Image (spheres, helix red, strand yellow):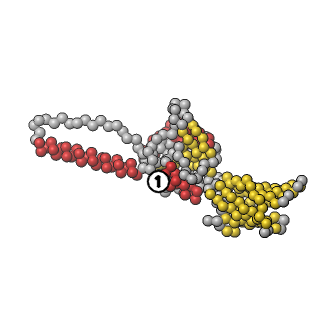
Amino acid sequence: MQPKEKENKIVERPIYKRALSVTRAVLSYAVLFSLIILIACNANTRTQDLDVPFVPTPQPVVDRMLELADAGPGDYVIDLGSGDGRIVIAAAELGATAHGIDLDPDRIEQANKNARMAGVTDRVMFVEGDIFEEDFSQASVITMYLLSSVNRRLRPRLLDELRPGTRVVSHSFDMGDWEPERSVEVEPYDSNVVHHVYLWIIPARVDGRWEWKIDGQSHSFTVAQHYQEVNVTLNAGNSELNTSNAVLRGERISFMAERGNRHYVYSGKVDGDRIVGSVQIHTGDNHRLESWTATRSGSGR
């Protein structure tokens, strides 16, 4: 969340004539002091309403964030805490549709002005709202420059509400124990400060027990999942197979299995409680490709 920058104000002190009475002077100072306290309280309340101070992301970092997310035509980019709109505008300039969410109405006004200047108002919008309440489930790319504590608060919503395969990019701050798919360093040309950019891909939920048949024989595998990390145990009939190279990336899952001289290479797309894909079956010098449809029969959660 990006709060409004504080303005440096010069307060001119009134010059009182000696003819003023002491009582009048005391009352004037009392009123002035009360006004100062009231302004300070309002400013403090406003700051507490904002989750994150507004600090603009350098343009080279903006460009690297969108590059890491592979944002472009066909994407819907949502920037959480959009500030002056620079990430939303840059996404639109790449051909994406985008919108930003920010609590601060002054930032919304500034972002709309910047979008008009950039000539992208037909592909962007800015919403004054709370990132913990606004709907962002339609995004294919989420960008943010928040704080680690705010990222962790958002993490359950990101995992529960975004479609598998959605890319999430954060400037400077991580997601706690959710390890990123990639992280890069960016050092803008006009600064000696190194900026970190992190990429996550929303994983499908695959934990639990899955069943299918190959050549009339029942197969099953059990998946233990920690974010995108998966551990697969596979059985054919009453025999457990050796499994390896289990990978979950978004909605795609793949793994290998062996039993004797038979080698399986599974690849599929997760769709709720079904996985549909193919399996390569290698037996000695014989190779064939079969369709593969597995159904979840029990949850590991």
Q: Position of residue 226 (x, y in %)?
A: 62, 57
Q: Position of residue 130 (x, y in %)?
A: 47, 53
> What kind of residue is marked 1?
Asp
Image position of 108 (left or right of 233): left
Q: Position of residue 121 (x, y in %)?
A: 53, 43
Q: Residue at x 64, y 52 (%)?
A: 165
Q: Residue furthest top?
A: 190
Image position of 119 (left or right of 296): left
| Image quadrant in which you'd find residue 272 | bottom right
Q: Residue at x 76, y 56 (%)?
A: 256
Residue closest to the eye, 38 or 151:
151
Q: Residue at x 66, y 53 (%)?
A: 250
Label 1 crowd bin: few (<14), some (14–19), many (20+), radius 10 Å: some
* 197, above or below 237, in the image: above
* 191, above or below 166, in the image: above
Q: Residue furthest right?
A: 285
Residue closest to the eye, 11 or 263:
263
* 277, above or below 148, in the image: below
| Residue occupied by mark 1 | 130
Residue closest to the eye, 264 or 49:
264
Q: Position of residue 150 (x, y in %)?
A: 49, 51
Number of marks in the rendered image: 1
Say if residue 167 shows up in the picture. no
Q: Residue at x 60, y 48 (%)?
A: 180
Residue closest to the eye, 123 or 170:
170
Which element carries disc 1, helix, strand or loop? loop
Say if residue 220 shows up in the picture. yes
